[in-house]
Image: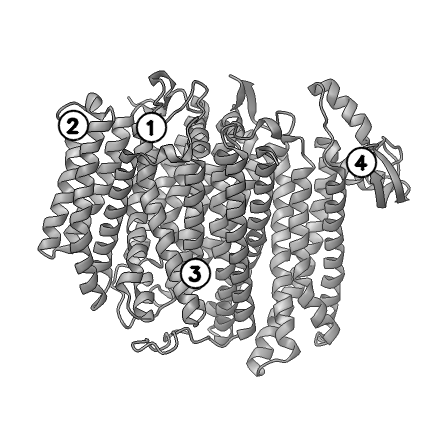
Amino acid sequence: MDALTLARWQFGVTTVYHFFFVPLTIGLIWVVALLHTAWVVTDRPIYKKMTKFWGKLFLINFAMGIVTGIVQEFQFGMNWSEYSRFVGDVFGAPLAIEALVAFFLESTFLGLWIFGWDKLPKKVHLATIWMVAIGSNLSAYWILVANSFMQQPMGYVLRNGRAEMNDFLALITNPHVFVQFPHVITGAMATAAFFIMGISAWHLRKPADEEHLEAFSLSFRIGAVYALVSTLAVMTVGHTQAQYMMRVQPMKMAAAEALWDTENPAAMSLFTWGDERERRDVFAVKVPGLLSFLAYNRFDGEVRGINDLQEAYVEQYGPGDYVPPVKWTYWTFRLMVGAGMLMLALGLWAVVAVVRERFGHPWLLTAALWGIALPYIGNSTGWIFTEIGRQPWIVFGLQRTADAVSPTVSAGMVLTSLIGFAVIYGALMAADVYLLMKFARAGLAVPDLTAAGDPDAAPAPAHA
Amino acid sequence: MMDLNTLWFVLIVVLFIGFFVLEGFDYGVGILLPFLGRTDTERRRIIHTIGPVWDGNEVWIITAGGAMFAAFPHWYATLFSGFYLALFLLLAALIVRGVAFEFRSKDRHPTWRATWDWMIFVGSAVPALLWGVALGNLLRGVPIDADMHYVGGFFDLLNPYALICGVASFTAFTTHGAIFLNLKSTDPIRTRALRATRTVGPLATAAVLAFAAATYAWTDAFARLGVNPGLVPMTAVGSMLAAGVFVHRARLGWAFAMTCLAIATSTITIFMALYPRVMVSSLNADWSLTIYNASSTPYTLTIMSVIALIFVPIVLLYQGWTYWVFRHRVTADTPLEY
């Protein structure tokens, strides 16, 4: 494999891995902050225990998100130096602002929250977790401003052989970020919601005692409502985003549907097995007119196909292949939407059960436990879809991925780092899942963390 | 009146100073952890001294990286792609170290804890060494061609001068961390930290002197700064010596102020010798990257200046407050979160 292919794999692997942790952080922090607030307001011990329980899981996950995020900040320069030179004047700004405005905030205040239980006045300590919540969500906004520039470049001018910023306001109010940010945030909330619901369900199957029953019944209720609301939201804004992308990146959406030729009205594919080289269907099941409806809210209207767009792009950008890998885009899009559908079904089921005060059914509890995986599938395939669907561009219409790679970094070097990251990330994932499961199972009890046989072990912390 | 490019050069130096002064003692504490903590509880107390602050401290380098990207994209691109494998090692170290702090005490198994403790050690030692190597190479010069591309290999970075810089940063951070630990712990850790300071401190002083001599011998700093290098480099060497005197007299608060000063002024010295260059080409002086040929547009620099001038003071305020909240020593009664 050449350096370009390896660099793309490395970016894909490290980014998808990073995004295993980010959504849970963004979505769970609101619940931890609300539970903490409930404790401060009511002074009921159960809220404190719940804050500590979900907070502990939050922290284990947060650590992984932080350290894998450092890689993101550095690897544009490492593997994509020509990209960095070409767009640095525009793209560097949101990254730097993210670090200065958001990352400092969440990291510093998280330290205060973890260690501040006995040091800070109760209300000041409560404020620190809200600062973390604001910081991590703000962070997502700035990162998505950067990504939106890659999807739909705004606020720049081509000058001196590079993209130079000429309108900061246009950059940060890119219409793309206003469809992407809500989609990512609501997806993150759904991730946390199904996480809470699944773990609560596990405890509800055989509650350890009355307190666990109460705490996890409440958690399940919170999780179920959060799940339904966030899933409805992520689907609604996702639909808006898809309609928006039909205009901004029609090729991505045509590839998502494996729509080879322009159709009016356009049929929606339910299942297509196609020949990517010949650009034709081998076997397909389609619903007539549905794609037009999804695109324009009416059952007619032209949706442009891959072949026509390819011709139009050759005319606009010169000779080249402007078709993204159709199998990847088609199937990742379907996995994402499929995960969303299942989340909606599960969310509805759970909310109905909660409303009827009968959510102890073993089928529901088992489904909720396995449901934890659904948003992870949706998040990962969603990002793989949107990034692969933009190919061959790294910045849509401005720079091709092949022209962006570092010319001085050899295939051997990228292979070394790729293997290194894979080994480290694999080991850390094992440790992370082990700890999450251990603390999720431990429930409200505070596990004894003194090392076995330590002569001068301190007594368990008084506040725990 | 300072131009925007110079302002951003200064801002990035400020970010590096913040990073080295703050994360410097974090690295030092991490390096000393396996040697000064004999029981598990002692090791937890040692980690607790930096527990509330290490994450916030690390953001200084993330911000410095982001600032380089935004203000000097060519510097960011050439440095990070050129020093590729070194950067990878640095990232690997930072990844395992950060996770290790959070994970080590969450399981009671001795092997689990010992493994993460060594991760903290390696994750602190590798960056402590590599930062010196990296800065040394910026100043000494590396093969950069007319297109701003690094054309050397990984082992070109491991030249004697850069290695001296690496040893200097490693020993200086270790000393800095040992002094910090003196201020934040109680016996028996404190006594051991004092002993460690007195062992590593002289090595650090010698290494910093060797770094100063080597800088004059092997870089163009002499030609640029003159026989009398001026106040800043002399302060760097002087404060290192003063730190030794204060350690000898067991005035650790003053000694810590001196190592802070030494790290800050050493960083400034390197960047002063560089200015207005940011990376020196060893192939042709005209091919060096400077704050002008590597920079963003005045428009971007202006926008970023406004944001930096608003938010850097705010960050300093709340980070300063954090240090105030956690100003007390970690004692046997301190609840251990990690």
- Sequence-wise, the earlier of marks 2 and 3 is 3
User: As shown in the figure, which amino acid type bears the numbered disc 3?
Assistant: Glu
Q: Chain of mark 2?
A: B
- Sequence-wise, the earlier of marks 1 and 3 is 1
Q: Between B68 and B97, which is closer to the camera in this rendering?
A: B97
- Residue A39 in percent (x, y) is at 48, 69
Report which residue position mark 2 lands on.
B229
Q: Secondary structure at mark 2?
A: loop
Q: Tell me the mark number nearer the camera, choosing from 1 and 3.
A: 3
The circle on residue A276 is 4
Q: Secondary structure at mark 4?
A: loop
User: As shown in the figure, which amino acid type bears the numbered disc 2?
Assistant: Pro
Q: Secondary structure at mark 3?
A: helix
The C terminus of chain A, quarter of image: bottom left
Q: Chain of mark 3?
A: B
User: As shown in the figure, which amino acid type bears the numbered disc 4?
Assistant: Glu
Q: Secondary structure at mark 1?
A: helix
Disc 1 versus disc 2: distance between alpha carbons? 22 Å
x 52%, y 30%: residue = A406
Report which residue position mark 1 lands on.
B7
